Image (cartoon, coloured by chain):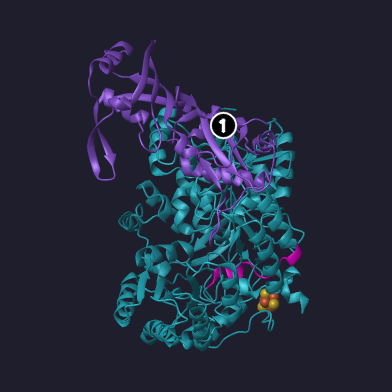
Amino acid sequence: MRVRLKFSKIGKIKYVGHLDTMRLFQRAIKVANLPVSYSQGFSPHSLVYFALPLAVGMSSEGEYMEIMMDEVVSPSEVKERLQKVFVQGITLLDAYEVEEKSTSLMSLVQGADYTIILKCENASITAQSLADKVENSDELIVLKKGKKGIAPVDIKPLILKSDFTQENDTIKIDLQVYAGSSKNLNPDLFVKALLGEEAYTMQVSRKELYTEEKEGLVPIYTVGRINE
Amino acid sequence: MSVVELTDALLGKVDKPARYIGGELNSANKAITPEMTRVAFAFPDVYEVGMSHLGMQILYHFFNRREDVFCERVFAPWPDMEEEMRKANLPLFALETHTPVKEFDFLAFTLQYEMSYTNVLNMLELGGVPIFSKDRTQDDPIVIAGGCCTYNPETLAPFVDIFYIGEGEISYDELFDRYQEWKAQGGTREAFLVECLKIPGLYIPRFYEVHYNEDGTIKERISLHKDAPEKIRKVIVTNVDEAFYPETQVIPWIQAVHDRATLEMFRGCIRGCRFCQAGMIYRPVRQKSKDVLIGHAKKLLESTGYDEISLCSLSTSDYDELEPFTNELLEICRDQKVNISLPSLRVDAFSVDLMQKVQEVRKSSLTFAPEAGTQKQRDVINKNITEEEILRGCKLAFEGGWNRVKLYFMLGLPYEEDTDIVGIAELGDKIVQTYFGVDKAVRAPGLQLTISTSCFVPKPFTPFQWAPQDTAESFIEKIKLLKGSITRKQIRYIHHDAKTSVLEAVIARGDQKVAELIYRAYKKGCTFDSWSEYFNHDKWVEAAEEMGLSFDFYAKRERSYEEVLPWDHIDIGVTKKFLIRENELAKAAKTTPNCSEKCSGCGASRFGKGLCHES
Ligand code: SF4
């Protein structure tokens, strides 16, 4: 059976990178004694999938992962047993079964919400000035490191929504972008496109992941769900 | 109690910030009370290295099994983090509660290799703890050091309050009890250290004075306190089956050098290789029974979720019930999809068979350590393995489908001649011939034979403790000679840096004058000396020149049997008489049987345990 979990990753644990987090889950699943399935072949590994990598230093309230299991265990029990293993930082928010044949978690991901808390040294940069910049430019060009080296890309078409709010000396950005394997905008790149060489610090948190349905983007947890 | 806050801005600037956050799976978390004895267990290297160390995992859980003790972990911050901490004025802290190390009752270092000593000093300094023992006050933690390097404690003697000689399970409880009594009564620091003189296995350098001869050798060591024992005998566990063993391991956040469950099969080794310090200082050999090991394996795998388990021993093939044990372990591991890693196997049919069972895919390479290239030289070092056995083992491996073999050797072993070095290449050549002698249809294509040499470092408490080490120039010559003798294109040759090995020899057999060298080198900015990207040989040379210390005196000079050695006050059970006899046998290229064949009367039987008493 396929059990999908939604979880948050908050606090210092955000400094544990994607691969290490995956390893952590694989181990936690074994400690929780869940009947996880293994791949065939010479070096079997447990079948555990993540929706979208999360960068080191980024926290999240909307992470998804999926466990394939050989035996039936109710999703609420999976959640409970796994939660007992995690000491801090990772909270399982939701667990549900998905249909065997439904789309893989990774290919579901098409959009993401982020909240960015930005602090600029240059006081003339405000929520308004940034909002104007996004609004008034036809394209937002930034240098991006890719497989073939560094190349300029236009990220404007990847932005779905961006709201800027001034909160004293920080700027809060609520950002919705394309995400996933075909089109993806990293929030770091978005900020770089807006600020260029300006000095700034920021904290980024992922809020939710989406998939595209006829009616538009819907949160991942709403699709493919078999209710208990 | 204060807490060191690591801001996002700071952690955002350093590489692998998860090294510094703590809170890993299976790490300890306790409510802190004023009565609690707090121990900061420090490994003087980076997180990924320290977290791989079995001894630390054992003692961490051993200490924390006591409710009145809270042990936390500390590692050396990587230079990028150190820089940020210094900029932000943050002291060194322990991972569990982020409390500065200065506020702990004990700061306990484990010393595993000499090239980490400058990190010890740096960690003290970063923690705001005076580097010299004599400068510490009531406000400072008691600095204690244990681990294999403490068998020659002298090179760190001025910096450490208490050396713990031996296995941790024996005297730490008593030490903590005494500490708690002392704390309740409110005595001086000195009074506590005097009290510690009565605890077995503890060496407290401040109660001794060393006098030197004019030629720089040691004249005598005198006790300054009536309770300071003239000799400090190591303490060891007699019943390893009943000894504490952790049911779990702390799972590092980021991939450690060895990231797996570890089973300790033995303490000690029956072999008695003459270059090997571990083989002498951990005598007598004590092995855990199969059922105990299987029990540990199950619990460790259950509590860690690891997909690899490693057997820890100096010589796995010598385990009594190896076949039934590995069969049982294999069964558990197959069920749980766990890989087994088997170090220190001898080259024999059983090993090859075992490797075959363990590695269903044959992608990994086989590793063996003949240590020397010719029979004569193997007899000198008492490595009881013949060329025939090596070639037979390789043949079996090639027939089993392996095509990658790695062989370890040492250069500069005592009584070595050029023929012994060329002999390494010749042995390599014979292995290549063996490979081509195996039917094409059976062997895997594309042999890759790796020959790796390290530079021999004479160590205290070995039969070679009196031996001269080769100079760096001579090592380089020998490396050249070997390189030139290897003609087969299937053989890849890799070698270690000669200069590091010479310095290692200086420190390994150093006295308290070498402590000053370490201090000076540290002051010049040396840290992380075991990392080639940070090792700065010139600074060490400068430091030595400034104080008129000669590397040759420590590394190259042959000692006489009469000379007082810096570590003579440490008693490992094995007698000097035995070591001398072994060195004489080495000169004659005569071997000594291993402990399971025949007891050679090394002296370690005084502990009343081990193989010596079973036969
Ligand atoms: S006393 Fe004999 S059997 Fe025991 S360790 Fe020494 S040599 Fe080996």
Q: Is residue B356 above or below residue B532?
A: below
Which quadrant contains ligand 1?
A: bottom right
Residue located beneath label 1 in the image? A6
Q: Chain of mark 1?
A: A
Q: Amino acid at mark 1?
A: Lys
In the displayed structure, does residue A158 sit left or right of residue A52? left
**Image location of residue A4, percent across then percent down:** 58, 36
**Image location of residue B158, percent across then percent down:** 51, 51
Q: Is residue A151 above or below residue B429?
A: above
Which quarter of the rendered picture does the C terminus of chain B lie within? bottom right
Q: Report the chain shown in cyan.
A: B
> Element under label 1?
strand
Kindly indicate the quadrant of the structure image that contains residue B67: top right
Kindly indicate the quadrant of the structure image that contains residue B595: bottom right
Tell me if I can see residue B272 in this picture. no
* Front-lying residue, B61 or B577: B61
**Image location of residue B524, percent across then percent down:** 34, 48
- What is the span of residues highlighted in magenta in the rendered image? B276-291
How many marks the image carries: the answer is 1
In the displayed structure, does residue B157 sit left or right of residue B477? right
Kindly indicate the quadrant of the structure image that contains residue A132: top left
At horizontal 54% and vertical 80% (from top left) the residue drawn is B383
Q: Residues within 10 Å of mark 1 (few under 14, many from 20)?
A: many
Quick check: is B146 in the magenta stretch? no
**Image location of residue B382, percent across then percent down:** 55, 82
In the displayed structure, does residue B165 sit left or right of residue B67? left
Tell me if I can see residue A138 in this picture. yes
Q: Is residue B604 above or below residue B247?
A: below
At horizontal 47% and vertical 39% (from top left) the residue drawn is A106
In the displayed structure, does residue B123 sit left or right of residue B309? left
* Front-lying residue, B125 or A151: A151
Q: Report the chain shown in purple.
A: A
